[in-house]
Structures are given as structure tokens and as C-alpha cells.
Image: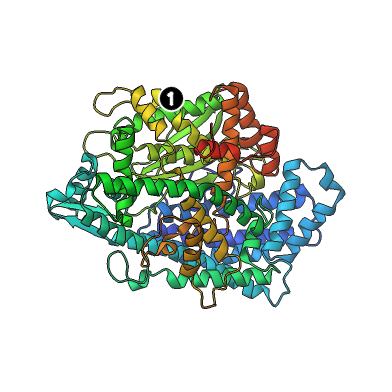
Amino acid sequence: MSANPLLATVGQPKAVLPPFDRIQPEHVRPAIEQLLADSRALVTRLTAPGVPATWNDFAAPLGDGIEHLSWAWGIVGHLHGVNDVPEWRETYNDLLPEVTRFYSELGQNLALFEKYKALAASPEFASLSPARQKIVRNEVRDFRLSGAELPEDQKPRFQAIQEELASLSAKFSENLLDATNAFAEIVTDEAELAGLPEDVQLAARAAAERDGKAGWKFTLHAPSYLPVMQYAESRRLRQVMYRAYATRAAEFTDGSSKAEWDNTPLIRRILELRAEEAQMLGFDTFAQVSLVPKMADSPEQVLAFLNDLAVKAKPFAEKDLAELKAFAKAELGMNDLEPWDIGWASEKLKQARYAFSDEEVKQYFPEPKVLGGLFKVIESLFNVKLKPDAAPVWHSDVRFFRIETAAGELVGQFYLDLYARETKRGGAWMDEAITRRATAAGIQTPVAYLNCNFPAPVGNKPATFSHDDVITLFHETGHGLHHLLTRVEELGVSGIHGVEWDAVELPSQFMENYCWEWEVLQGMTGHVDSGEPLPRALYDKMLAAKNFHSGLMTVRQLEFSLFDLRIHHGFDPKGEKTVLDVLNEVRQEVAVLIPPAWHRFPNSFGHIFAGGYAAGYFSYKWAEVLSADAYAAFEEAGNPFDATTGKRFLDEILSVGGSRPAIESFKAFRGREPSVDALLRHNGMIPA
């Protein structure tokens, strides 16, 4: 094995677990340069005139060979996300243009394109498995979207666009993280801590001590920011935190931003480049490009879906807000609710209406019980076993697990990185480390990364999670199961590979339903002090409050989805209208809560400017339709763990990965087209 740990897969029949205990930034350039050279040599060899355009002679060795590069670069990208220290940031950004250039060259390689087209038109194609046929069709489609059919004199410009977009997306994410890290509010008056949970106060005290300061330190990271907005009696503290959070990575020079972190020019440039890319490919807008590999047929179809949902949801949102305002005036003495009051007043209303608080519930979800309950759900649904495993990790908090069949055969493995850190990008996400495929040496089992940003333990007690945190964990695990429980043996459509982007959230949102089942919560709760499980009376209150402000939350998601689609469809980034103008237009149509004029939501919308959701954020709402309808099959069976339904979900949704169109998988599971009724019922918008 090579001394460079990032070359560990070269010459091996299967990918190996990332050697995080040995990888250093100085390994990256020599390894990636060698893998790029190897990959280019492989492409040259396979596109030579004498190489037949067959699966075994061409397609299979191409996929196998380039996997070495994707494995190594995937590790570098992962470390950039979870350990964003200066050395790794510099290393990642140093190689990003070169890696982007290679994949851009690959997508524009006419010789490769001709080979795939020849394979698709050959007599052999009909004899290929459905999974292999899907890979070939996907490749032909993706070559067209990568500019392979462009005139030769236009390809350098198209390639330059891809490189600049990759660089801008990385910079957007880094600016957001830097702005988030830069802000801290040091509280020295203990009276301002009123209302804050004890564990939040302890964490704030510990954070201040680490900085050598007296008092309590509050930051814009979710475990610190969200409790302040929900519980802090100090209106001043809430206002300061809200302003800093709302203006992250913006043009303002106070609070959480600096001029060099302003994402505003990046947003406009990203949109300009995406529009130019679309025009070069023969499309009118980038939204049309984005939808080619998705379930939806056109931007107009998506807009109709979102607008129809908005019409149904907005009356519920208006009712939610009217009730909140009336409560705030009558019970809290507040005639005017400011944006920084909404979360706090909502929590007060929920406590008054349902006689419980999220903080009370949180005490029943210590980490060991939550993980045990999650694992039991997976084992019961899919007839597998989860066990602790060992592997090198990137941080001492990270744990590693394995999934086995009932007979003890390895199915897959995953890393679990639960806690927030200043060097870790925000949010929660699943990513792949290794993908399942067949090799000459046997099956290569899949490996996933599951990343969250939950509050770490303070003192001797285990970490406790809010119910929303638990839902997030189940959500990301659903993505992981989609990757890990696949039975497909072809790299290009195994697990989440090849799954339409607006269907990829189906398994994740499906798993969220189990966070509301009494049978599940009984086994996954135990008070952090007494060990007593969640009382039935408290569960009943939680269930009664399940759709509390669901109207407000629905129109908020629709606001994000419509904004995303409109700035990618019919918006001229070089025109006088700004993205904020578009956002304000959307808000006037669907929102009931209008933030201050200085709010800069787009500057932190990483999903569409630094992630893969550009002109695709609607996928969350569409996947909610699919997931609610899928879970309704278990409701109809009368048992959330119905073995027959669980096996069918595994067989028809999870195990097939991207080997067939997602709508076919859904219909194979449900026996019909998806219906929006289950989502509206789950959200309390039509009678149960």
C-alpha cells in the first residue's frame, strides 16, 4: 500500500475505510495530482478507436477507475466540512479548481459521449440489466448537460463557468461559517439569563471561560442561538442575536459580518453564471436545466404545485399568526410583535395551550436512549442489526457503527458526528464515503457519514436532545439508510446515486414519522435525572401540539421554494431588480410574517448557493408529499412496524436506489400515483 493514505485504494479491488488517523493536508496535492493523471490516462485508453463500446470493455472499467479519485476527493471535501481549520480550507480550495476542471473535461469529452451513445444504440444494450441501462441513459443525458454537444470553441468557456461556480460555492459556505463564528454576545448581567434552560446557561458559561472571559457567551451556532430565541426573557438579548443572525455574510459591517464576508456579490455572480450556462445548453433558464434529471417536468409545473399548496396553507398561517398576536396582547402585554419576539411568544403560547415546554420534553431524550430507540426502529422495520464498530475518525466525538443482516453478514457502516463545533459547517447532512458495488473480489459494502450540530454534553450528564433534534437525527438517518440498504451492485445507480433530486428526501422524511409514535417514544426516552420514560400525558400534549403553527411553517418553506425557483426562472441577474426584490414579491404573495428590510436571508441560503438544491428547494415539499403518502401505507396496515409493508418499502424504495425512475419505485410500493391528501392530513389541514 502506498505511503500516501489518500492513495490507499489504488491497486485495490475495493475501496477501503478512509484512514483519518493518517491523512494530513500535505498528502492531498500529490495524491490528487496522481489520481487526476491516472484518470486522464484511463479515459485516453478507453476512448481509443480499438476499444469496443461495450459494458465490460468500456463502461465498467471507466466507472471503476474514476472511483479512486472520487473516494480521495470525497474525503478532502468531507474534512473541509467537518474540520474547517485554515490548513484544510487552504488545501481544499487549492485543489478545487483542478478537480472541477477534470470533471468538466470529462463531461465534455466527445469521444466518451460517442462511446456511450454507441453502447445505447448497440444490440448489447437490450441485454443489459435495467440498472446498467439506466446508467447508460443517465450518462448520455449528463453529457448533454455538461456541454458535450457544444461547439469546440465554446467548451473552454463552459468549463471556466464550472470552475468559477465551484469556487464561488465554496467561498459562499466559508463566508457564512466565518460570519457565524465571528459573532459572540457576552452577557454579564445574570438577570438576562432569565428563561434560558440550565444546560444552555452552563454551555454559555463554559464558552466564556474558554475565551478567558467572565459571564456567558452566546453565539450564532444553533445550540446557542435557537434556545435564546425560544426561551430568553430578555428582549434586548433576543433582538441582538436576531439582528446578527439575520445579517450574516451581508454587506453590513456590524454584528456578524465584515466586508470580505459579504455574499451579496457572490449571489449575483452565481446566478449570472448559471443563466449563461443554461443559455449555452439551449435552455431559457437555469431552472429548466435543473429539472432535467428530476421528477418534475417543468418550472411551470413546480410553480403550480407550490402555488396550489400556498393557497391551501395560507389561511392556516393567517389563523396561526392572528392567534399568536391576540395571545401576546392579552397575556404578554405586547401590542406589537417584533420578529425577535415570534419564537419566544410562540413558545409561551404553546406552553399555555398545551401545558408543556420543549425544554421539559428535552429532559426525556438523553443521547444513549435516543440512539438506542433509533437503532431499534431500523432493526424492527428492516430486519437488520446495528452494532458499534471501530475505525479511524476525524474527531474524538465521532462514533462508528455497522449494519448486519439477521444472519450476521455485513450490510454497511456509518460514522456518526453529532455535536456542533466552530470548525464544522452548520446544519445536518448525510454524505457517502463508499458506495456499494460488485467487484472481482466480491461486494464492496457502503459507508456513510451522518453529521448533525446538536449541543454537546456539559458536565457529567449525557447530551439531551430536543424533539426537533431527534426528528433531525431520524431524517439524516433516512438518507443514510437509502445509501446503506441498497441492493444495487452498479456504482452509478447504487444507493442515492441516480435518484432524482426531488425524490431523494422521501426516505429521510419518511423516517421522521417514527418520532411521533408512542410505541417508539416509550422505548427511546428516559429522564436524564430519574430515568423515567416519557409520561403518556406529556406525549398526548406533544401530539396535540404536533401541528402547532404548521400553517406558518408551511408557508415559510413555500417562501424559500418559490424564491429559489423564481431567481432561477425568469429573473435577470444583470437587470435592475435584485434577489431581495424577488424575495419581497414572493413574501407579499405567500408569507404572513414579513421580516425587517435589513434582513438578508439569501446571504445564508447555503442550500441553493453552496449546496445541490439550486432550482430544486421545492424538493423538500414534493418529497413530503411522497413520504406522507408512503407512511400512510403503514397507517392503513394498522401498525407502524407492519412487517409486510416494511419489507415492501425496503424492496421497492430503499433497495433499488436509482436503478429505476423514482415514480416507478413509488408506484411499485404504493400501487398508485402519489396523493397530496396524506400530507395535508398530517399537517392538520384536512380532517383525519
Expressed as whole percent of the image width and height from the top left, the position of residue 47 reads 75, 61
Q: Position of residue 288 (x, y in %)?
A: 66, 62
400 or 333, nearer to the observer: 333
User: Which residue bears the numbered disc 1?
Assistant: 518
Q: Is residue 429 visible?
A: no
Q: Work out whether 281 lies above or below 617.
A: below
The amino acid type, in three-letter code, at marker 1 is Trp
The quadrant in which residue 543 appears is top left
Say left or right for 125 vs 74.
right
Q: How many marks?
A: 1
Q: Residue at x 52, y 61 (%)?
A: 563
Q: How is the image coloured?
A: rainbow
Between 103 and 627, the residue placed more toward the observer is 627
Quadrant hosting residue 107:
bottom right
| Secondary structure found at label 1 | helix
Q: Nearer the viewer, residue 267 or 513?
A: 513
Q: Position of residue 640 (x, y in %)?
A: 53, 25
Instruction: Determine crowd level at label 1: few under 14, some 14-19, many 20+ residues with C-alpha closer than 10 A.
Output: some
Q: Is residue 235 left or right of residue 45?
A: left
Which residue sits at x=53%, y=67%? Answer: 165
Q: Return the x and y of residue 187 as percentages of the image width and height.
A: 17, 54
**Observer able to see residue 149:** yes
